[in-house]
Image: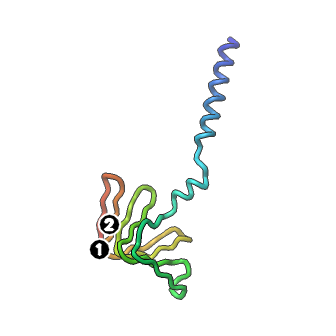
Amino acid sequence: MTRWLKTICIFILICSVSYIITAQNPDQEEENNHIRIIQANSLKYDEKVDKNVRRLIGNVILAHEGARMYCDSAHYNGIENRFKAYQNVKINQGDTLFLYSD
């Protein structure tokens, strides 16, 4: 009976250690939630409009949590992690979701 108990304790210990090792780093998880700028022909900044907003112009591509967004221009707020897309907006997520807007 004690050998069986030792075996179960070792198994639980191994499972606990493997869970701790594979647990995601909270900083890494938060970093993955940020919108990433993949491409833009130009980036403009005007403090008079909004000090946190950058204007992305021409062939804009943004990525967020496995989805890609394409548009002609966008206003990107990195502090609030949001954007507004303008003209010829296309969103693609995986092989199944395709959204289009003008």
Q: Earlier in the sequence, mark 2 or mark 1?
A: 2
Identify which residue is drawn at 36% across, 56% down.
Answer: 93
Q: Residues within 10 Å of mark 1 (few under 14, many from 20)?
A: few
Residue farthest to the top, as pictured: 1
Could you tell whether 88 is left or right of 15 in the image?
Answer: left
Q: CA distance from mark 2 to mark 1?
A: 9 Å
Picture quadrant of residue 6: top right
Picture quadrant of residue 67: bottom left
- What's under tag 1, amino acid-wise? Asp
- Tell me: residue 94, above or below residue 83: above
Q: Do the residues bearing badges 2 and 1 touch, measured as CB atoms within 8 Å?
A: no
- What's under tag 2, amino acid-wise? Lys
Could you tell whether 96 is left or right of 16 in the image?
Answer: left
- Tell me: residue 1, above or below residue 42: above
Residue beneath label 2, please?
90
Identify which residue is drawn at 65% across, 19% down.
Answer: 7
Residue farthest to the front, as pictured: 41
Q: Secondary structure at mark 2?
A: strand
Q: Position of residue 8 (x, y in %)?
A: 64, 21
Identify which residue is drawn at 55% across, 77% down.
Answer: 52
Quadrant where the N terminus is found in the figure: top right
Residue beneath label 1, please?
102
Decide which of 68, 42 is in the foreground and name it: 42
* Numbered disc total: 2
Q: Which mark is residue 24?
A: none
Q: Residues within 10 Å of mark 2 (few under 14, many from 20)?
A: some
Q: Secondary structure at mark 1?
A: loop
Identify which residue is drawn at 68% across, 13% down.
Answer: 3
Q: How is the image coloured?
A: rainbow
Quadrant where the C terminus is found in the figure: bottom left
